[in-house]
Amino acid sequence: MTADADIIDALRAAGLVGEGDVVLSPLTGGVSCEVWKVETPSGSIVVKRPLPQLRVAAEWHAPVERGTSEVRWLKRARGVDPGMAPEVLAELPGHAFAMRFLPDCPVWKDELMAGRVDIGFAAHVGQGIAAVHAATAHNEGDRTDFPNDEMFRALRVDPFLLHVARLDSELAFALTALADDVSSRKIALVHGDVSPKNILVSRAGPVFLDAECAVYGDPAFDLAFCTTHLLLKAVWSGEARLNDAAAALVAAYRAAIGWEDAGGLLLRAGKLAAALLLARVEGKSPAPYLTDPEHKRIVRDQARALIMAPQPIDALVANWKRTSP
Ligand SMILES: Nc1ncnc2c1ncn2[C@@H]1O[C@H](COP(=O)(O)OP(=O)(O)OP(=O)(O)O)[C@@H](O)[C@H]1O
Ligand SMILES: [Mg+2]
């Protein structure tokens, strides 16, 4: 029996499809999972199954249990705001799951890369990320539900922070300290992969996907991770509106911080953003569009300086240069 037949059997067992022909159409993306669209009698659904090894250049193994973490995050986020994540329809064997397909919702990355930069939408993304953090901050139940420190270390701390620390002796001390700090903080539910390619643009606002790295940890990580993507795209495109989008995202997030001192969180996010910016030009998961050596240099020079002399993320964004001085 093929893997696809396994999925179809599981969908039948869950009552999502009937006895007739079922077609699994692969969806684009899918670095870490197989993702299919399936037509069912009650509408289109998406089935997602984690791969044991990610499809990136460097060898990168990841436990398939992350599929279950993703389901938990999607459900928890919908508890905060049902518009924020797709509805989970069934959990399937192999840590796969089925969710409702959202029609006519472009991926935010595609919008940004096409030059359609909606600053209000960026602010809405900041509010959305903060809403989950605010709802889960200092919450023992959420802490117990997302004990994924080992997975977060393997998928985020090691490849993005420690990998670069191993390559760059000058920055090793600061990056290792940052890795220890982010690993030690247990403050709120972190999505772990808030990238524009994991956000759908619905008429009602952002819909967050792909929460395989969810962990109870430092909310500064999500703010830094998403902002980093906007700043990298600003260098790639030279588009000032991407700096404005990053500033709007950070400002909207900042306005919602009520669970801890905002200044402390923004400084942690600034340190993390600096490290993540460098990781996207030196690390195991490089930004695929930053191929121009000059673009890489602009990011690398600013990121290295910011790791040595950190700034809060709002200042970092305000000072971010798209071109060489
Ligand atoms: N519920 C959904 N409705 C509509 N489209 C979806 C849905 N879920 C996923 N997609 C589409 O499938 C793509 C891949 O989904 P997802 O990001 O969850 O998978 P992934 O394998 O983890 O991807 P990657 O590793 O490339 O980020 C998304 O970018 C989106 O285009
Ligand atoms: Mg994705």
Image (cartoon, rainbow, N blue to C red):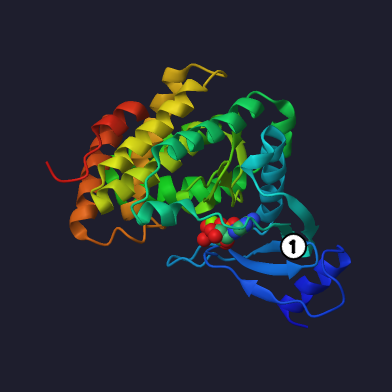
Residue in the image at 68% along x and 74% along y: 24
Query: Which quarter of the picture shows residue 92?
Result: bottom right
Query: Which quarter of the picture shows residue 186?
Result: top right
Instruction: Give the amino acid at mark 1.
Output: Gly
Q: Is residue 146 visible?
A: no
Q: Quadrant of ligand 1?
A: bottom right
* Position of residue 202 measured from the top left corner of the image (x, y, whole percent): 56, 47
Q: Give 26 or 293, whichever is nearer the viewer.
A: 26
Label 1: how many Cα within 10 Å (few below 14, some 14–19, many 20+): few
Looking at the image, residue 46 lies above or below residue 271 = below
Looking at the image, residue 54 lies above or below residue 177 = below
Q: Give 31 or 112, whichever is nearer the viewer.
A: 112
Q: Give 277 or 236, whichever is nearer the viewer.
A: 236
* Position of residue 4 measured from the top left corner of the image (x, y, whole percent): 72, 76
**For mark 1, what is the residue?**
43
* Position of residue 64 measured from the top left corner of the image (x, y, whole percent): 67, 59
Q: Is residue 24 visible?
A: yes
Position of residue 136 in the picture relative to residue 105 (left or right): right
The mark tally for this picture is 1
Looking at the image, residue 292 lies above or below residue 179 = below
Q: Quadrant of the C terminus?
A: top left
Q: Give 294 or 89, whichever is nearer the viewer.
A: 89
Q: Is mark 1 within 8 Å of ligand 1?
A: no
Residue in the image at 71% along x and 77% along y: 23
Q: Quadrant of the N terminus?
A: bottom right
